[in-house]
Amino acid sequence: MAPRTREKSGKQPTINDVAALAGVSKKTVSRVINRSEFITDKTRQAVEQAIKMLGFVPNPQARALAFRRNFLIALLHDNPNAQTVLNFQQGVLDAIKDSDLALLVRPVDRGSDRMLDDVRIFLEKQRPIGAMLLPPISENDELAALCEDLGVRYVRVGSAQLDDAKHCVSSNDREVVAEAVGKLVDLGHRRIGFVRGPVGFRSAAEREKGFHEALAGAGLTLPDDYSAPGNYRYTAGIDAGEALLSLAEPPTAIFCSNDEMAAGVMSVAYGKGIAVPADLSIIGFDDSPTATHIWPALSTVRWPIREMGVRAARTLVPDFLDIGTKPGDEANILASTFIERQSVAAPKRA
Amino acid sequence: MAPRTREKSGKQPTINDVAALAGVSKKTVSRVINRSEFITDKTRQAVEQAIKMLGFVPNPQARALAFRRNFLIALLHDNPNAQTVLNFQQGVLDAIKDSDLALLVRPVDRGSDRMLDDVRIFLEKQRPIGAMLLPPISENDELAALCEDLGVRYVRVGSAQLDDAKHCVSSNDREVVAEAVGKLVDLGHRRIGFVRGPVGFRSAAEREKGFHEALAGAGLTLPDDYSAPGNYRYTAGIDAGEALLSLAEPPTAIFCSNDEMAAGVMSVAYGKGIAVPADLSIIGFDDSPTATHIWPALSTVRWPIREMGVRAARTLVPDFLDIGTKPGDEANILASTFIERQSVAAPKRA
DNA sequence: CCTGTAAGAGACACCGGTGTCAAAAGCAAG
DNA sequence: CTTGCTTTTGACACCGGTGTCTCTTACAGG
């Protein structure tokens, strides 16, 4: 299918082969490849035909060397949620599909004290044009400073603006959490519990803020024992569920800072014979696969992660992507969505 | 922390800078970098010190060009299970950590009819040393042929040997499924249902074979209506659950070809008031996060995916990794494990 | 002390592209 | 047909490493 006369010699044709075949200098071929404007149509066509005949593909290493810049962008993550990483990655790939860029993916061990050095070595070795930082490591200011220091562009992805607009892509989690909790209030819930995310995570803080906003808006208060600690893990959901559902006057609805913890709370409810959603409404966050794999399916908040990947790439390397309107200075705040499923209902009349 | 006197000029030091500082030729520096043996300790130390002083990191693009070979390996996948991809990827990174290699990750759209051309373009452009193919695309013989044709090494990851040993890393899924189903039999189950994987997938075929082996070993037969079709999706599990659990004489245990379908079956059981595991035992496959996020937690089969990533990398590029014993010709068949959780129990006496 | 040999180090070309600048070509005006 | 200018093309150096081959140097043996 691919146009190629190249014999199966195993060797790639080079720019010199193309130049020889087209009867021009290699510099002229280079001009065609790079879409220089100072070239006659006739020459361009001759070169393009030679390129096609030989199945020539420019060697990215050689280009990188000559350009004094390579064509790599890096994705750094330390994410417990694999689906999120992969979706984001897919968005980035959507964005760079027709460019010369390639994507390096690099997991980072947030826990390790050598983390910064590891990343430094990686960046110095690979010298990507830019790096995209996924939460939670996007919240690490030292990491951003490191990129800055090394002259590597960066974009931080998060649940709120963490930095200047040109270094940020985020979603409006706080608002959407407030909206979701508002729905609980509208249904008549007055005793609403909360399962927190891990301490020090911006995403957790944003979700908590949104929760408090909604409560305040409805004139409700959150008793101390209605707020349980968590760490985004399923087991934390179990613990939180045990704590909240063992109260003398348990909540009729619980907002959990992510889906996994919501699944944990739900399994506790199930064990205690508390029916969801009849006796207890539950809302999660992430719209992870788990959300639809449990019963009843979980109402949750979906953040536009793939779209954020696209936007992050465009923000990072607009000059390498053929973008009509430079995204430039507009703030990259994308909309999350509250997804209503079966885990929410009006409370029983007490 | 990193040893560096380099002023913040933004420019990387080159091999020439090191050579000048150490008072040797750049070729000598090159010898030190590449651990040539024909060098005196004194010279080597002088060079190493200069490297440290400057914080020199060899430019991988320049090396790639001079070596006529780059230092990239590619991971091609089209996997519905994000966790699997990420775990495998982590294994690969474990294996190449101390090497000069970097990993390119490339999702592939199995459905697209341009898939082969897309991959061809990717491989021609990036020219990785080798490619690792994850299931299900690892089962595509055309893809393997393409790699062969382009002179790109490849390793196919699967649930059974798909090719010569040197191109394969697999797990013994069939045996472990047989073991798992054997446990059901040992517990006293006689009416055991099966939810199939998608048609044409080797992984699905292996799991089905293992199931039939176990039944045959126990002298049991599988009624036609005890085998439901599936496609590895949650919704297929719902359909299968509806079909199997509406039978006049429903199975007392169901083996599902993956966890998501098992979750689907479980939710149907829940809806019908069938208690798991008291009235129905369920086993899944994959040990995906879902398996522990549902209630009761799912007994399942875990395949050693991270370890397979390590092995795949070693099989692909043994010459780039400092491996004591070349894995060479030994077959790369790793052991999956049956994980017992709460979704399995003895059947009630009928 | 001289010679022969092998180990160690260097000079130079080269990998496959791009930047720079000068030369060639095209074209309008004189 | 020149001239003078602009557009198009090419020659050559260079990016930062490695391969090859040659030249030194050190040291053992005569």
Image: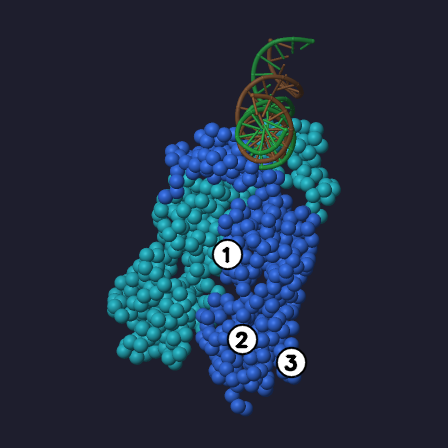
Chain colours: A cyan, B blue, C brown, D green
Which residue is rendered at x = 34% and y = 55% of the image?
Answer: A202
Measured as percent of width and height from the top left, residue A8 is found at 73, 44
The residue singled out by tag 3 in the image is: B217
Instruction: Return the residue at label 1.
Output: B90
Q: Quadrant of the N terminus of chain B?
A: top left
Mark 1: amino acid: Gln
Element under disc 1: helix
Please indicate whether residue B313 sits to the left or right of residue B23 in the image.
right
x and y, in percent, of residue A337 in the image: 42, 60
Q: Is residue B178 above or below residue B25?
A: below
Secondary-structure class at tag 2: strand
Q: Is residue B311 left or right of residue A9?
A: left
Q: Residue at x 42, y 57 (%)?
A: A336
Residue A137 percent location from the top left of the image: 39, 52
Instruction: Name the secondary structure under disc 3.
Output: helix
Chain letter of mark 1 equals B
Instruction: Identify the image quadrant of residue B77.
Output: bottom right
Which of the labelled discs sits on residue B283, or is there none? 2
Pointers 2 and 1 in contact (C-beta within 8 Å): no
Which mark sits nearer the N-terminus, 2 or 1? 1
Dot 2: chain letter: B
Q: Is residue B166 among the parts visible in the rendering? A: yes
Judging from the image, mark 3 belongs to the subunit labelled B
The quarter in which the C terminus of chain B is drawn is: bottom right
Amino acid type assigned to the residue bearing label 3 in the image: Gly
10 Å crowding of disc 3: few (<14), some (14-19), many (20+)? few
